Amino acid sequence: MAKFLIIRFSSIGDIVLTTPIVRCLHKQLPDAAIHFLTKESFKDIVANNPHINKVHTLGDDFEAMLAELKAEEFDYIIDLHHNLRTLRVKNFLKKVKSFSFNKLNVEKFIYTNFKINTLPKKHIVDRNFETLRSLNIINDGFGLDYFVPEKDIVPKNDIPAAHSAGYIGIVIGAALATKQLPVHKLKELCERIDHPVILLGGKEDRAAGDLIAAVDEMKIYNACGKFNLNESADLVRNAKLIISHDTGLMHIAAAFQKPIISVWGNTVPAFGMYPYYGAKSSQQYAVVEVHKLWCRPCSKIGYDKCPRGHFKCMEKISIDEILTLTKQYLSR
């Protein structure tokens, strides 16, 4: 029986984007054992995945983790993170055959610094499958997976009664500030939306959520920081529509086949991280971005603040466009 170790340390969205590989390995090699290595803080994303036999975590004791992995006697390593730490793992397990994801860092550097796009027109999920081409693992076209355990299903009485008949989920956070709409733009959006809204995000988004919810506390419920990740995923699963920045909950929404309006700032869909439903899905998403802005994209990840000081990539986002798209999706 072959034993695989899949490595993706972070972050939420990137880990969710590995789930088609996990599922297809499990289904196409049913006798194989599939292990997953990630950071301790992201363990819950994969802990409930029925296609994974065992989860290993990167904690404070790297040497102990290496010893644990060596004892497993893996046959293959699938490195979907490909950084210095994964190189250390592969070097330690040097007798194990490994496959490493090509992050195309040179192409991304050229795009962010010279605004010349030489990136392939492929989603990162499809590029993940290219990593396993020699194993003949084929993308089944069923998109992403996310599994919410029963203990994290949000009871109906944990959200306001006004939202129980349906709501729009708006993900207000992101890993870095240049991927987020400013609070004043989010306040305008929520004020003008004619539908119950639940704001989604982590504890770090709580204060901004309070400011936005103050616009209309009957219509807008600030769930930021009140629910853990799996509970927030359950709120995403039950939303009519998700409006999101380029962030982890956007990919979780795609895993649940929700319609998505994705709002892009300093990053761009061309990096291959746009919502992914799979070839067999008819679900649709929309992209809202500022076109022909000379300084965009300025980073493959993002910054704590706009390096140019003007933040036009988000300040010039059309709230009217988002509202029009919202009406179109809700009328379907």
Image (cartoon, grey):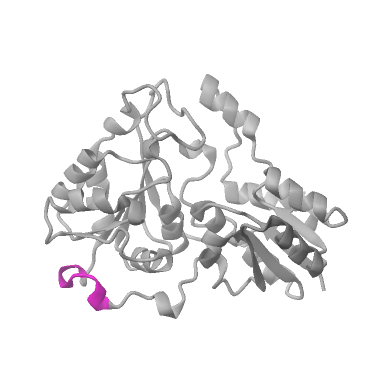
Q: In the rendered view, tell whether residue 111 sits above or below residue 239.
A: above
Which of the pair 4/224 is nearer the observer?
224
Image quarter of the C terminus? bottom left
Task: Work out whether residue 166 can be spotted.
Answer: yes
Please state, as top left, top right, bottom left or bottom right, where the N terminus lies in the image. Answer: bottom right
Which residue is located at x 39 percent, y 66 percent? 228
Residue 161: say if magenta: yes
From the top left corner, tell me how far across and down residue 272 is, in percent: 54, 42
Q: Residue furthest right?
A: 95
Task: Label the magenta part by its dominant secondary structure.
Answer: helix
> What x and y, as percent, mark residue 247?
43, 49
Residue 296 appears left or right of 171: right
At 37% from the left edge and 64% from the top edge, which residue is drawn? Answer: 232
Position of residue 3 in the picture relative to residue 154 (left or right):
right
What is the magenta range? 156-163
Asked whether residue 200 is drawn in magenta, I would say no
Q: In the rendered image, which quarter is residue 70 located in? A: bottom right
- Which sits in the foreground, 35 or 225? 225
Asked if residue 324 lies left or right of residue 132, the reply is: left
